[in-house]
Each structure stands twice: as structure tokens, then as C-alpha cells.
Amino acid sequence: MTGHPDPAWRGRLTWAVIFIALLYPLLAGSEFKPWLLFDAQSLRAAGMFLRDFLVPAHDPEFLAMVLRETWLTVAIATAGLTLALLVAIPATFVISERLSISRLGTGRVHPFAAAVRQALRWILMILRSVPELVWALLFVRIVGLGPTAGVLAIALSYSGMLAKVYAEILESSDAHATDVLLANGSGRLPALLYGALPDSSAELVSYTVYRWECAIRGSAVMGFVGAGGLGQRLDESTKMMAGGEVATMLIMFVLLVAGADLVSKILRRRLG
Amino acid sequence: MATYRLRGLTVRHLAGSRAPALHALDLTIRAGEQLALIGPSGAGKTTLLSTLACAHRPAEGVLEIFGQDPWQLSQADRHHLRARLFLAPQAPPLPPRQRVVTAVLAARLAHWSLWQALSSLVRPRASDAEAAFTALSRFGLGDKLYARVDRLSGGERQRCGLARLLLSNAESLLVDEPISALDPALARHTLAALRQEAQQRNATLVCSLHQVDLAREQFGRLVGLRDGRIVFDAPSSAVTDAMIAELYANEKVQPASDTQHDTPAQIAVGACF
């Protein structure tokens, strides 16, 4: 066994020790104290709350309210995502270097075109680096409590994300078809539609549906700051320690995500 | 008027060492002329075709296409010029998930309005579909009109790429190894169809080939390229076996073999060959 010692072993061990040494102060700094979960008082409170979970609230009036709020949540997510797409699709078209005509034959993008691309990239970065919850808080101040704030918050933060990832998906597809179309005199948008889209469409759709799923979750969270929908009710029920109601609404979330998953699967199969 | 006039044209690779790929080429190609480029792998045939298609900017020397220097033109004018040239790369540039009809009609994008491009993507016009069918039929692929590209074999894809060429109304056809994936009988038929098409519309045809026998048989003018230099430029009747042997001297691969060579499929947009 000693004849051929693994040369990677010492390095792996060293890195593991370094990681643990770095991680521990982080845990201590963030006051991560998991044992608090298990002290008697917490356990009793959690136990009461969780016992309510076993029987989700199911009186017709409450269910009707949950369905109404679910519909509102889905509507907020969908409207926000649609607005985001209106910004993201043209932005993708601008920032994608794949579609540069000035690059053709020289390998270098024209400085002006590069500057425009970079400026738009920065704008998109700012849009997506502010969390949607913060956008929602700002918009609740501006347009007041209600779904409008949620829609605008999703539209702003998601347009930045969608444009960035769309551009990356398009740029990671095979460049050959697009390049040849451009080299034969095609315009930028037709080259995108005929060259890059066929092979990226399934991935683009799958990412969009995944983002829709995130928007549904996001609009629920934004409900906590008063942006309407299921989240606002969830906030109220949690504060009242009404475990049954919370359970019903959580089940609703699971169903929504499962639904989004199904939609994604069907679309991908059709585009595959 | 000459379609192409090259004087002392030097072309460098676009990335990496920027080493010269073509050295001081002198070449004139008349309108409607048909010529074959032959030479060992790595001689610069693909780079030359890209340069002739305005897809690769030369470093030094004179390049005139239809009497104009494309790199003196504005970017928009140069792009209009590209629509008059058609480059068919060796690897057919067909997205696997596209339908054959769409892939073939993509030849017309340079002349279509955006609206036409969009509507053809949803439903090709009957006249366009008919034209695509006719072009595919020339290469024996009429029944594949509405098939998806990924259902085609390698040879079928190559011919599908050539059917796209038939639909462009370019005045200069630059074809890189059009028959590398075809069997000998089909290869002869395909080359004949290409030449006939070029002749009918009086387009210039420049075709790189590894099949020396076919090149000598089908083309009136042969240009031998080696290490980025023109070794000979002569009527094929004047090209002797000795000249061919010298062109390919010390090559391990036999010149007439049908094997794919190592020219990467990408054209010169971002990187070197």
C-alpha cells in the first residue's frame, strides 16, 4: 500500500482543514446556534404550531379565499413576468455578441457597439442586483399597498435576470449556423431567429417557465410587505399561529410549483 | 468585369499568433468563371474562401470584389455586398432542430424583410416552399422538405446545405468541400448540379475540393494552393500528374481519398482556423 501514495491526498486534506477553519468563524459570526431549536420551550411552541399543521384548514369559506388569493398570486407573477419579457427580449438582442456584424471578418467588435452593449449590461445588472423584495418595498411606498407594487417589482428584477441568461443561453449554442447566415448577408434578427433559436428554444422556454415558478414564489414573499396575494394571507396566518391555515397555503404553493413543472415538461417535450 | 481581383493579398489568422494563412496571393477570377481550389489540408483553401466572402479581413494587399474594396466600404454597404456572395462552408450550417424547408429558405434572409422572415418561420409561402422543393429535388432530397434536419444523414445534410445555395441569388458562389461526405457517384452528380446552376445564372463558382480527379474532370481551371501560396493556376488540361504529385508531396493522406480533413467547421468570425 505504501508503494504508490496518492499525490492528491495532502492537498485535499490541507484544503479541507482550511475550509473548516474559515467556515467556523462565519458560523460563529452569524450567531448560528442550532441547539436553540431543541430547547424545551422552543420545542413546545413548535410542537403546538406543528400539531395544527396536521389538519390543514379546509372550511369552504377559507378555501374560497385561498383560491382567490392564489389566482391573484399567479396573476401578479404572470403579469410581472410578461412585463419583464417585454424588456428582456429586446435587451437580449442588443447585448448578445453573437449577433455582432462588426465582429464579422475582424474578430473585433466595433468600440461604439461594445460600449452600448456594456452600458446595457450594467443597467441590467443594477436591475437584478436589487432584490425583488426591496423593489416591492419601494413600490409599496410609491403606488400603495396591493398587487401593482408586486407586478412592478417582478418586472424590474426579472428583466435583468432574463436578459442576462437568455443572452448566455444563445451564446452557448453552436455559433456556426448564425455566423454563416451573417456572413451571407442576413440581418441580425433573422440570423438569431433562423440560426440560434431552433437549438436554444427548449432551454429558453424551460428557463422562462422556471422563472415564472420563481415569480410565483417571489410574489408570495412580497405579499409579506403588503404587495398582495397569497403571501399577505400567509403572513397574517403565521402571525396568528394558525398552523392549519398555513398548512393549506403551503400545500397550495407546492401545487403551484408542481403545475409550473408540468407546464415546463409539456413545453419542452413539444419543442424537443 | 472581374468578380475578384487579388494583388499581393496576405491574410492572417484572426486570433492567437496572427500568423499569416495566405501569403501575397495574386488571383483574378472573371465573372461567370468556374474554378476549383485544390491543395493539401491546411493549405489555406477555407481561409481564401472566407476572405472572398468578406468573412475574413485581409491584412495587406489588394482585394477587389466586383471592382470594390469591401473593407473600404461602410459596414452597411459591406453587409449588402455579402448578400451578393454566397459562402457554403464544409460543415452544413443547419440547426439540428430546424425543419429542412426553413433551413433551405434561410438563403433568402439577406433579401427578405424582417416581416417576411418572421412569417416564413410560421408558415412558408407556397411559392417559397415550391422553390425549396425544387432545389432539394436537384439533389434528390425532395421528399425531405418538411423533415427535421436532425433526421438527415451526414451526406443528406451536406446536400441540404447546397440546396440552400441554389435558393440564394448570389452572383458568386464560394463552396468549401461540397462533396466530402458523399459517395463517388453522388459526388459527381452533385458537382455537376452545382456547375450547371452557376452556369445558368452566370454566377462565379469557386469550389475547394480534395477529390483531385473530379476537380480535373469537372473544372476548366485549377488553382493549387500549398502553405498559403499559389503553386499553380492553370487550365486543367495543362495540369500534369507531376504538378499534382508535387502539390501533395510528403502528404501522408492520399489526395484523392474521401476522408474528412482537419479544417475546422467554423468560419473566420471570432477565432482562427
Image: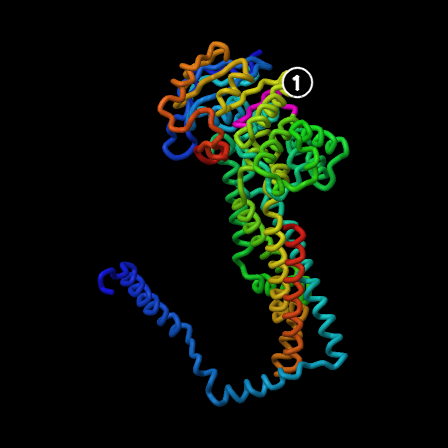
Q: Which chain contains the residue that carries disc 1?
A: B
B48 part of magenta stretch: no
- Rendered image quadrant of residue B126: top right
Q: Position of residue B207 (x, y in %)?
A: 53, 22
Task: Count the marks.
Answer: 1
In the image, residue B109 above or below residue A200: above
The percent coordinates of residue B18 (x first, y second) are 38, 30
- The residue sitting at the top extreme is B238
Along the line of sight, which residue is nearer the eye, A187 or B228?
B228
The image quarter containing residue A239 is bottom right
The residue closer to the viewer here, A221 or B159, is B159
Decide: few, some or many residues near mark 1? Use Cα within 10 Å; few <14, some 14-19, many ≥20: few
Seen in the picture, residue B69 relative to A132 is either above or below; the reply is above
Q: Which residue corresponds to the image point at 73% horizontal and 37% vertical from the top-left?
A: B124
Residue B177 is a magenta residue: yes
- Residue B243 visible in the snapshot: yes
Q: In the figure, B141 relative to A231: above or below? A: above
- Residue at x 55%, y 48% (from the top left corner): A169
Q: Position of residue A65 (x, y in %)?
A: 74, 75
**Residue B143 as seen in the image, left or right of residue B38:** right
In the picture as drawn, the residue positioned furthest to the left comes out as: A3
A193 is higher (above) or lower (below) than B71 = below
Magenta extent = B169-178
- Would you say residue B59 is visible in this rendering? no
The residue labelled by disc 1 is B201
In the structure shown, which secondary structural element does the residue marked by tag 1 occupy? loop
Residue A188 figure quarter = top right
Q: Look at label 1 and name its amino acid.
A: Arg
Residue found farthest to the front: B185
